[in-house]
Image (cartoon, rainbow, N blue to C red):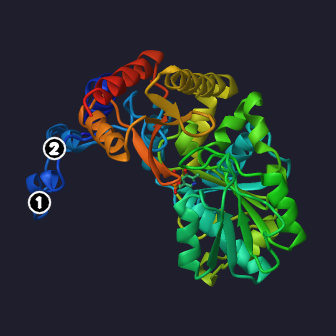
Amino acid sequence: MSFREDGYAAVDWAAEYLERVADLPVLAQVKPGDLSAKLPAAPPEQGESFADVLRDVDELIVPALTNWQHPRFFAYFAVTASEPGILAELIAATLNQVAITWRASPASTELELRTVDWVRQLLGLPDGWHGHIEDTASTSTLAALIAARHVTGRSVVVCSEHAHSSVDKAARMLGMELRKVPADEELRMRVDDELRLDDVAAVVPTVGTTSFASVDPVRKLAERAHAAGAWVHVDAAYAGPSWILEEERWSADGVELADSLVVNPHKWLLVPMDCSLLWTSRPDDFRQAFSLVPEYLRTPEDAFALSEYGPALGRRFRSLKLWTVLRCYGRDGLQRILREHIRLANLFADWVDAAQDWELVAPQRFSLVVFRYNGSDQQNETLLERVNASGELFISHTRLHDRYVLRLAIGNARTTEDDVRRAWEVLRREAKRV
Ligand code: PLP
């Protein structure tokens, strides 16, 4: 086995995959169990060559992939694993840092603090916030609610009816009560006199909801929450990266009042899965909630261990890919890509708006378009299934006021205007057949 030769083959494979991904179906064209039927039930007794593995990646794995790197992946929130991020993952795996304490990985600890602070500056967030990296927004929100419960001694979480299910899940895992507040006509959490927060541990406004990309009134909610002694955790997992653009900063109004904030570079900042940033304006409270240093991890240095700010002890070198992406694109490169995504979403929304048989169903925000064909729910559902089965694009759905609606999210750096135009053509073609 030659690491160098296998490595070149792996990089060649990765480069070729990225060159041909646009020609593959976006949604995996397999049925449940198809891959399982082809995989040996028992592990190999003798080691095989890396070349054999690579061959099986082509023959078995690729046909069972939904290709998230495809330029016409428009479902959920589309993402990009950029080339610099991919290469940084190779180096991070090579170094295999396990950053349990500063001593265990000075580089990982200090690079993480610095790169997360770079993102804070790029997004225009307040000075002095402490940020670290978690795997996903689900973990970041779980950690924030743990801190909120610890600090307030309360056990109620409040969010909008359109908050992401990770808030429900975190509350459930923590045995906290979840109160969902109805949204207004612009799909923002309602803040009126009936909203009681006296017994609330945390209020979780969302900037960029999953279904509609709507934006809760963060400032108003934060003022009310703080007056009632509650913690404010802002979920900007998807839309937070857009604050790199001055023209999108309107949606950050009031975020400076947050006690904690989650933003996912693995959603819309070109960093490969996984990388979720969790900032807090109250680092001492966070540390109190999480710090637990057993004898075998005590070290003489008076240095920082990021494991004292969240659930995990062993921490991956995630900052390496974030650092690499920030350096290879710079503010300017990232701005250009996000701005283009928003332009393409607006263009698609204009086409939908101008078409007789189609309608936009939510205010246009960021890079997500929520729309439907003027037909029954069943027709829209059939349309979605037909479009996705074509392999030409992949979109997803949600429900609004009990109607089935379609979502087209732009977030892949390879997506061009031609891809969006093709998506619109396929949608209209299939709509004629439902
Ligand atoms: N919050 C919002 C607004 C989201 O859209 C999502 C996922 O799409 C999440 C949280 C959960 O993200 P993760 O998959 O990183 O846990």
The residue at label 2 has a CB less than 8 Å from ligand 1: no
Image location (x, y in percent) of residue 39: 12, 55
* Along the viewing direction, whichever of 299 and 35 lies nearer the viewer: 35
Residue at left offset 37%, top offset 43% = 376
Residue at left offset 63%, top offset 83% = 295
Residue at left offset 51%, top offset 56% = 97
Q: Read off the residue under disc 1.
A: 44
Q: Earlier in the sequence, mark 1 or mark 2?
A: 1
Q: How many marks?
A: 2
* Along the viewing direction, whichever of 308 and 415 lies nearer the viewer: 415
- Mark 1 residue element: loop
Give the crowd class for mark 1: few <14, some 14-19, many >=20 residues within 10 Å: few
Q: Read off the residue under disc 2.
A: 60
- Indicate the amino acid at tag 2: Leu
- Label 1–label 2 contact, CB within 8 A: no
Image location (x, y in percent) of residue 48: 13, 50
Q: Is residue 353 visible?
A: yes
- Indicate the amino acid at tag 1: Pro
Image quadrant for the N terminus?
Answer: top left
Image location (x, y in percent) of residue 415: 45, 24
